Image (cartoon, rainbow, N blue to C red):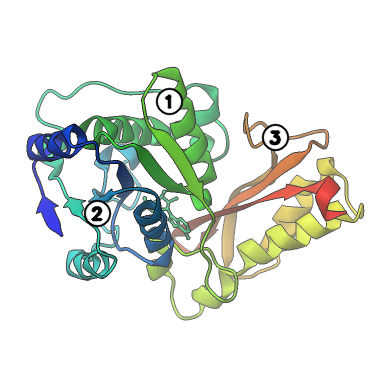
Amino acid sequence: MEIIRIPKVMQDTVGGLLIRGRTIGFVPTMGALHEGHLSLVRRSREENEKTVVSIFVNPLQFGPSEDFARYPRDIEGDVEKLEAERVDILFMPEASLMYPVGFSTRVEVGTISETMCGACRPGHFAGVATVVAKLFHIVKPTRAYFGQKDFQQAVVIRRMVKDLNMDVEIVVCPTVREKDGLAMSSRNMYLSGEQRPAAAVLFRSLKGTAESLASGIIQIGEVRHVLRQKILSEPAVSSVDYAGAYDPETLEELAEPKGEILLACAVWIGSTRLIDNILINIKKER
Ligand code: AMP
């Protein structure tokens, strides 16, 4: 696996691959890699001739009181995992090369960035869209792979790609979970021994609410309350940023049932913020 740290070198290297007509699959990450990330890498390897993974903890997408400084980093372990997956190129730029002095451009994706996580983390999705736009220009992928776990992020990226005529196919892959249903996340490392089993409450509550909705026990307008109560029944939960039923395209909270429904939540367990979601189709589930 080739490790590249300089954006211009990365651009020149993919330039050479593209001249030779190679398809390039790209998996952007913030490192501390787990099976969720590796599922995207495997999908990329299946569908493209070359696979590029980036590891970059993007300062632009963290708020001033968020966990940028303590975000888990494990470069040695990550390199080992990516070597084992036979990744072609690891792009690992320094922040000073991504955001040199004077950097002042932002990619802002409208209303879909303002609900759900966007409402709780102002500026977060502008940080995400800006870095992903830069990475797309540097890596020039044929396809880029994102996880459903970060559903809103995938919607924002799709919108950006469409709005700015970016020539890249966005592929969204299923959420990989631990045995008890907890969505894999680098942030799960923050959880203490007692908090870790409690964190399964997110998925359990999403599933329970989906079942009640599908069987007609609750109506769509009750989802917000029911999901929140289920999550708060776990004593380790400190607070719920949001929990509800959303339109998977517009991300607006749903007042009326629709074909596909996104059930999503963001929850604090101590000082760790976790997110999860499931997509349901009430007609199919019935
Ligand atoms: P991150 O390193 O957290 O920025 O995540 C990098 C990519 O991996 C994003 O597209 C995430 O949605 C995806 N990802 C993270 N966790 C999972 C998971 N449990 N299952 C599938 N994809 C994931």
Give the mark toward the camera: 1 or 3.
1
- Taking 56 as reference, is 248 above or below it? above
Alpha carbons under labels 2 and 1: distance apart:
28 Å
Q: Is mark 1 within 8 Å of ligand 1?
A: no
Query: How many badges with numbers are in the image?
Result: 3
- Taking 220 as reference, is 83 above or below it? below
Q: Which residue is mark 1?
A: 160
- Which part of the image, by quadrant, shows the N terminus? bottom left
Alpha carbons under labels 3 and 2: distance apart:
33 Å
Mark earlier in primary sequence (2, 1): 2
Q: Which mark is residue 69?
A: 2
Asked which secondary structure carries label 3, the reply is loop
Side (left or right) of 141 relative to 43: left
Asked which secondary structure carries label 2, the reply is loop
- Taking 202 as reference, is 223 above or below it? above
The foreground one among 59 and 234 is 59
Q: Residue at x 59, y 64 (%)?
A: 237
Q: Which residue is mark 3?
A: 253
Asked which secondary structure carries label 1, the reply is helix
